[in-house]
Amino acid sequence: MFPANKIADDRSVTVVLGTGGTIAGRSARADDHVGYVSGEIALADLVANVPGLQGLQLEVEQVAQIDSKDMDLRVWQALVQRLVHHLARPEVGSVVITHGTDTLEETAFLLHSLLPSDKPVVLTCAMRPASALMADGPQNLLDAVTLARHPGAKGAMAVCAGQAFAALDVCKVHSYRLDAFDGGEAGALALIENGQVRQLHPWPVMHAPNHDAGHDLRQRFLSAAALPSVTLLTSHADADGLIVQALLASAGDRSMQGLVVAGTGNGTVHRTLAAALAAAQEQGVRVVRTTRCARGQVLAQSGHALPEISALSPVKARLALAMELLSA
Ligand code: ASP
């Protein structure tokens, strides 16, 4: 179903899928970098405005036009559907996705988890709207296509400000700067410098195996009316268990199935919150711990009442648990 990547050459097609974001944003004034509306400019126009992209075998498709803070299951399903379609086409060598920066790392993780492909899938974005005096989107888009068409490149990645990060590692770390992303302790996978790719680490391998289990999870994801409800909480000084108790008490169509707690330090949890989480666990809710620290991972402690997801950021751990519940 998913043919292996052939060495990218000038004839292979790169499909560019648009989902919106600041890269497609417009503000009333060219010097306004924050008071703009995301997802305003058509992807075809963004691509047409990048001189270096002319003459390449590109296909452009608008999948959505949203501010990625509002990313939801419907848009994810549409995106995965189109990726499954395009990645199966032998003439397609790679896919680039334009995306808002706010939830880019979540979409990247999701694609990494669901797509069994050797072909590169490269997300890119911008921190300034397309209407800015010095917009960063055009260069990021050019860099993303450069990486996507680089011979041998594969896996789910994100490109911003000349750096490429693996989907597993990428994380938005700045609210305003152009180089808003980083790869945590793993660092950057590659640098894109003046049209050249300088690879620093091996290309990532997508997670979903190309066999029935991966296919089954993808099908469940694509046909789900809603993802299993997983709530993300943070442990902090003076924490209490009120939210957990309220969630347990609220009966609704989407009853809580999972809780991820971003713990302090090595996944430690305030004792009051821990007691509420233990009660939730007893009632059948899956509870896992990760860390609110930007670096490091949770080292397993034998006998801890709450299991840990060691090496994922809180938002990615939330998605990982939702995927696990979906496949159960
Ligand atoms: N709110 C915007 C979005 O995520 C931010 C951005 O793209 O930089 O769509």
Image: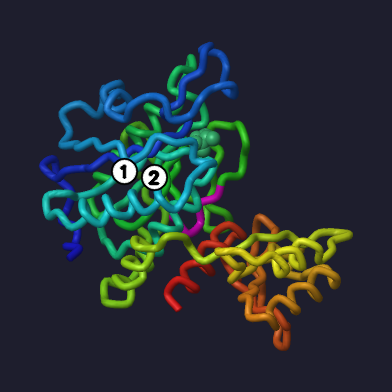
| Res 232 seen here | yes
Tell me the quarter of the image containing the N terminus.
Answer: bottom left
**What range of the chain is rendered magenta?**
166-171
Q: Residue at x 32, y 30 (%)?
A: 43
Please give left or right for residue 171 compared with residue 266 in the image.
left
* Quadrant of residue 203 within the rendered picture: bottom left
| Res 317 seen here | no
* Quadrant of residue 124 within the rendered picture: top left
In the rendered image of this protein, does residue 119 appear above or below residue 321?
above
Please give left or right for residue 15 compared with residue 216 in the image.
left
Depth check: 127 or 26 in front?
26
Inspect the image, locate mark 1, and give the three-letter code of the amino acid beneath it: Val
Q: Secondary structure at mark 1?
A: strand
Which mark, by number, is residue 86? none
Across and down, in percent, residue 77 comes to: 36, 54
Across and down, in percent, residue 305 comes to: 72, 83
In the rendered image of this protein, does residue 148 appear above or below residue 40?
below
* Quadrant of residue 142 within the rendered picture: top left
Across and down, in percent, residue 134 comes to: 47, 18
Question: Which residue does the numbered mark 2 point to in the structure image?
Answer: 123
**Total tally of numbered discs in the picture:** 2
Q: Residue at x 54, y 22 (%)?
A: 36
Across and down, in percent, residue 95 comes to: 27, 47
Depth check: 155 or 238 in front?
238
Mark 2 nearby-residue class (10 Å; few <14, some 14–19, many ≥20):
many
Q: Secondary structure at mark 2?
A: strand
Please give left or right for residue 32 compared with residue 190 in the image.
right
Instruction: Calculate the distance from the C-alpha at mark 1 to the C-alpha at mark 2.
Output: 6 Å
> Is residue 169 in the magenta section?
yes
Inspect the image, locate mark 2, and give the three-letter code of the amino acid beneath it: Leu
Question: Which residue does the numbered mark 1 point to in the structure image?
Answer: 96
> Is residue 13 in the magenta section?
no
